[in-house]
Amino acid sequence: MRRLTLLRHLALALLVAAPAAAQGTVPAECQPIMAAGDKQFTVPSHAFISSKGLGPTPMQSEAISINGETYVMVHDRWMRSPQTSQQLAQQAKEKVKTATVYTCKQLADETVGTTLANVYTSHTETGTGTTDTQLWIAKTTGLPLKSEVDLSSNGHKSHMSVRYEYENVKVPAGVQ
């Protein structure tokens, strides 16, 4: 059960850039975030994830999306997600249909490594909790570079830091 919960949280980490595509009218200030999320699933990506609050100790994990498949490292072992990348994206979009609040704000530009990025915050509220995200999107590619996500659901709080890479992404060796 804990493995399934971890997979869901890791899937969310991959999808934080596309939280409201299914919502009725998306606020104009949220359009760049949605565009980055949509674009992210058109290219291979490798996410490096640090999370706190999912268990008794902080966790490090990774996720790779390539050729429509998602692979997740859980407890130092690579697993193929039972859902395709497209199904995970659709799941996130369906979840946001129930959002009662979705707001975004652009902050001052910053540099991530050597890449200039637009920085955005978003706040989403649903019947089960809230998500607050800060997302850095590369000005040159429109792809997410990193995100900081605070989740609160049913009285449980967690935090995830995610760094995204797009170069030399390959299916991980030893997938089970």
Image: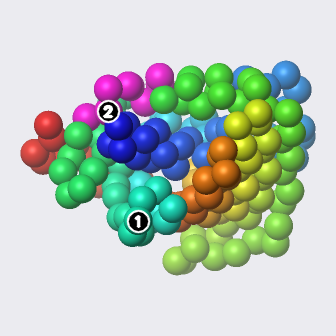
**What percent of the width, then of the height, locates residue 113?**
52, 77
The residue where tag 2 is placed is: 81
- Residue at 70% across / 61% down in the picture? 134
Q: Amino acid at mark 2?
A: Ser
Q: Nearer the viewer, mark 2 or mark 1?
A: 1
Lateral position of residue 153 relative to residue 65, left or right: right
Q: Is residue 84 above or below residue 154?
A: above
Q: Nearer the viewer, residue 127 or 159?
A: 127
Q: Report whether residue 159 is seen.
A: yes
Q: Nearer the viewer, residue 153 or 34?
A: 153
The answer to if 85 sits in the magenta stretch is yes
Residue stretch rendered in magenta on the structure: 80-87
**What percent of the width, then of the height, locates residue 25?**
88, 26
Q: Is residue 120 above or below residue 40?
A: below
- Is the residue marked by circle 2 packed among few (<14), some (14-19), or many (20+) residues within 10 Å? many
The residue where tag 1 is placed is: 56
